[in-house]
């Protein structure tokens, strides 16, 4: 069996590493049924510390193709990816195309494949924020519509797809648990303390923020920074600044310093694992970090008005902070809560193995 994995963004490298490991294990155990995986990197994320570092740290096979498509508007980026991916699929003729999550790379890979009648497997399928202004929501809904196997990370995703009528369609909907948990468990004992944080040990918050709705409005971004500085009056914060956010802060000329604020460049996954393991709180608008906070038993404040990971809010592990001025209140609420981290909301860390088994047994090819 030949598969092409289409990826392009940081969280996809983390998810794909688990699948590549499971494929290698499968190939060792089943030499007569080898899966050949070809990696196609769209180039959507291209900075060394947003891409290459992840391939090196997580031993992801080197991409056979790198399209180097980035820094464009949504339409231009998706359109160029579509054209180039189609050419590669026509040459490679894979049995499956695998896509992850909700980025432009996800949609372009799924669209190119489905138009050529190559079956698509969507990993992290069924999530919904119900906010159609988010480009991610558009990408995930459309990708689900053209996939043949929809791998769901949790019950909520499964329920969403059931409500949308997927049970009636000639596709397979499979709940596997969350593939990010596979990675978190695999790398938990390989965590590396970031060199720039030598003086820091525990009792700090980790902050990441990069969603367009938070970064692209100068007033909103400035309000977040002001409230962050207030929070730093009582709380050490490590802010790993995404390139998009750094560019917007520079464009809007927003400058800020505080003795309790540790501004750092984006870190590699092994360093992020160290931060998650040692922090006392996560502040984020990232989808992945909301779950990872739960994996590492850390309370989370989500800097958005809705989340697709609703079960985390229901169990109290996560609280939504829709407005910057709510930041301090949300933090103090979350730090006071007693949170039960014992429920297996995201499975047991064997998603990648289940995905490989389902692909090898599938009759969609
Ligand atoms: N991450 C990382 N270094 C950082 C920030 C995030 O390794 O400096 C990881 C994080 O642990 C998570 C993933 O990147 O697994 C989340 O990616 P991102 O926030 O870019 O995307 P989203 O999850 O929102 O789609």
Image: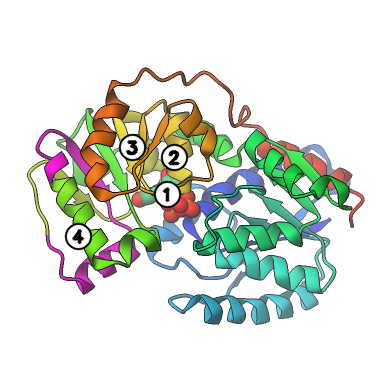
Which residue in the structure is indicated by mark 4? 222
CA separation, marks 2 and 1?
7 Å
Q: Is residue 297 above or below residue 178?
A: above
Q: Is residue 119 above or below residue 277?
A: below
Sequence-earlier tag: 1 or 4: 4
Q: Which tag, 3 or 4, sits closer to the chain's start?
A: 4
Residue at image location 76% in from the left, 40% down from the top: 174
Q: Are marks 2 and 1 in contact (CB under 8 Å)?
A: yes
Indicate yes or no: mark 1 CB to ligand 1 under 8 Å.
Answer: yes
CA gap between label 2 and label 3 equals 8 Å
Kindly state the secondary structure of the residue where label 2 is placed: helix
Residue 290 - label: 2
Mark closest to the chain's N terminus, 4 or 2: 4
Q: Residue furthest right?
A: 363
55 or 12: which is nearer to us? 12
Image coords of residue 290 (percent x, y): 44, 40
Name the N-terminal-most of marks 2 and 3: 3
Name the residue: 61% across, 47% down: 127
Q: Determine the image quadrant of residue 200.
A: top left
Disc 3 or disc 4, which is closer to the eye?
4
Mark 3, secondary structure of its residue:
strand
Image-based side of 347 in relation to 202, left or right: right
Residue to which mark 3 is pinned: 282
Does residue 88 lie above or below 132 as drawn? below
Residue under pointer 1: 286
Q: Are marks 2 and 3 in contact (CB under 8 Å)?
A: yes
Q: Nearer the viewer, residue 342 or 164?
A: 164
């Amino acid at each position: 069996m030949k598969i092409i994995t289409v990826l392009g963004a940081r969280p996809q490298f983390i998810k794909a590493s688990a699948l590549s490991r499971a494929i290698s294990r499968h190939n060792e155990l089943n030499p007569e049924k080898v899966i050949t995986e070809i990696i196609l990197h769209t180039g959507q994320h291209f900075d060394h510390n947003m891409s290459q570092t992840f391939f090196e740290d997580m031993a992801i096979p080197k991409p056979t193709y790198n399209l180097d498509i980035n820094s464009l508007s949504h339409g231009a980026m998706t359109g160029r990816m579509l054209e180039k991916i189609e050419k590669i699929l026509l040459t490679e003729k894979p049995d499956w195309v695998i896509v992850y999550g909700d980025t432009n790379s996800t949609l372009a890979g799924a669209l190119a494949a489905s138009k050529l009648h190559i079956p698509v497997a969507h990993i992290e399928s069924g999530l919904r924020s119900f906010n159609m202004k988010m480009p991610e929501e558009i990408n995930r809904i459309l990708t689900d519509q053209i996939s043949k196997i929809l791998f769901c990370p949790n019950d909520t995703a499964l329920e969403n797809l059931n409500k949308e009528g997927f049970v009636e369609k000639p596709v397979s909907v499979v709940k596997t648990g969350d593939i990010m948990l596979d990675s978190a468990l695999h790398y938990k004992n390989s965590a590396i303390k970031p060199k720039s944080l030598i003086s820091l040990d525990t009792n700090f918050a980790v902050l990441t923020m990069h969603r367009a709705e938070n970064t692209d409005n100068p007033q909103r971004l400035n309000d977040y920074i002001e409230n962050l500085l207030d929070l730093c009056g009582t709380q050490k914060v490590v802010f790993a600044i995404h390139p998009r956010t750094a560019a917007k802060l520079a464009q809007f000329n927003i400058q800020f310093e505080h003795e309790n604020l540790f501004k750092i460049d984006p870190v590699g996954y092994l360093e992020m694992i160290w931060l998650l393991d040692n922090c006392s709180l996560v502040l984020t608008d990232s989808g992945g970090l909301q779950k990872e906070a739960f994996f590492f038993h850390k309370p989370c404040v989500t800097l958005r008005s809705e989340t697709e990971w609703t079960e985390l809010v229901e169990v109290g592990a996560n609280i939504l902070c829709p407005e910057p001025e709510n930041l301090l209140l949300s933090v103090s609420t979350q730090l006071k809560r007693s949170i039960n981290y014992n429920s297996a909301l995201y499975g047991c860390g064997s998603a990648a193995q289940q995905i490989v088994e389902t692909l090898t047994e599938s009759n969609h090819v």
